[in-house]
Amino acid sequence: MPWTDQQPLLLEMASAGLLWGISGPNEINNRSTGNGSRGPNDKIDKTELADYPANSQDWAEKLALFRTAHRAVLNGVLISSPDLAPIKGGAADYPATLNVAGLVDYFDFHYYAGGGHQPSLPAGVNGAVGYFGNVFGWARAGWGTHLQGILSECGAATDGKTYAKDGVSQAKYLANQELDALSLGCHAMFVYQLFDGNSKSGDPEANYGLFLSDKVTPKPSAVILRRMQELRSLNNNADDPANLTDDAVFMPGINPSACAVSGMKFTPTSGTGMLFEHKSDGSTIVWLWNEPPIYDHGKSLTPAGVNVKVTLPRARSFRIHDMMSTESLNTPAFTAGASVTVTLAGYPMAIEIAAPTGYKRELGDPAGY
Amino acid sequence: MKSLLGLVLIFTAAIPAAETLPVSIEPVLPVTSIVARTALKSIGACGGFGDATPAQYAAALDYLKIRLLRGGYVHHGHSEIAVMKAVRDAQKSPPALRVKYYCLTPGLSK
């Protein structure tokens, strides 16, 4: 469908409050599959690397002009760069973009580690794309160094040869990917894809789903992503209406800089991270994760656990959530203490720290930080 | 008051404020602090909609507690304009579903 024909539907959707953003074309640097989309003014063979910058700027300008021309309707609708496919070998394809930071709100890229790997596998392992942070950096370097990113595709296929059929390694991969993306500064992340095309097929492309192809049965990845959404919601309940209306500013219930962590060194080296998510009720979710191998020859692996200790500024009430468990988030009892030890085994663990006594959203912790 | 204002500014921004911990950790990924609701509204699904019915979209998205979908008119060979209309229709049935689209524009070669 030509760009001019798309515009009325986009405006209709925006008027109805359904449009969040508009991206440029898909995988503009993708030569291997032929999916690389073309810019509106592009007459050049897309197999040429030199072609990509022209595409990028064409589309960035088109979208910027479209939003300006219809600013009354498109006010608040974000626009982003064309998106980039993760190319094996990496950096050679990423600087081929032009800086479009003056035209768009976000840069856009895709990432798949593949090969049963975790998102933050060491660069160059088995010819894979490389560490997620590298790809994030390469994409940002091209589009605009001050921009936040949108990870508009990521995922892992449960075909049994890429990740295990049982879906466990896919679940760990996606949970870690989500936290990798948020902690590096991604504005949003989209999981490819919602439903399997055919769960009985051995084709990887048919097995990226969060649900089986019956479109009803959630895979372990759907369970863990849902669980993470619940935990970061008010009252650990994503259906709580307050989540949709509470947009006022607030003070955090804990100061991350006053915390300390030890034990986050792994042999062999793996990706790892720590992310504080603050809720407006004064509670805090502290995510901890590491990324040792989780897949080997058709089977999901269970890595050896590693103890990590988090020291809080002072004694606080907390509880630990194992994100691969299906236990209710309201079941674990709170414990008081000034330090917490959790065991990491290749997927996120969460420490839920209750709001400090006397917390006020305007003032934070009355005992100070 | 000055420091209070500084913190408020940090937490009204969408950009996560990097806060490296004052201890020795392996700096493979940064330690970051964000507002939970920022993440709650930032996780979505894309592609793979195939022949699902509006009710199936709605049920899956409601299960996942996500509010974003990335669709496109042409993406990976699928014609997703029908999908976008189907999800738009699905929006009308379950009151909890408030999905927004992130649209992908095509190129001329498609």
Image: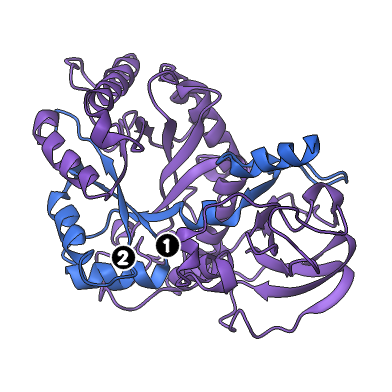
- Up-down relation of residue A159 to residue A98 (above or below): below
Residue A161: x and y in percent read: 42, 62
The residue located at (72%, 74%) in the rendering is A320
- Up-down relation of residue A233 to residue B47 (above or below): below
Q: Amino acid at mark 2?
A: Gly
Residue A288: x and y in percent read: 70, 59
Residue A22: x and y in percent read: 30, 37
Can marks 2 and 1 be said to lie on one chain? Answer: yes
Labelled disc at residue A307: none
Q: Secondary structure at mark 1?
A: loop
Callout 1 environment at 10 Å: few (<14), some (14 to 19), or many (20+)? Answer: some
Q: Amino acid at mark 1?
A: Lys
The residue located at (26%, 40%) in the rendering is B104
The colour one sees for chain B in the rendered image is blue
- Up-down relation of residue A302 to residue A205 (above or below): below
- Up-down relation of residue A36 to residue A158 (above or below): above
The residue located at (44%, 61%) in the rendering is A244
Labelled disc at residue A202: 2
Instruction: Out of A5 and A1, give the one closest to the viewer.
Output: A5
Q: Is there CB contact under 8 Å for labels 2 and 1? A: yes
Chain letter of the residue carrying label 2: A
Disc 2 to disc 1, C-alpha distance: 8 Å
Q: Quadrant of residue B107?
A: top left
Can you identify the residue that label 1 sits on?
A161
The colour one sees for chain A in the rendered image is purple
A105 lies left or right of B104: right
The residue located at (20%, 66%) in the rendering is B92
Callout 2 environment at 10 Å: few (<14), some (14 to 19), or many (20+)? Answer: some
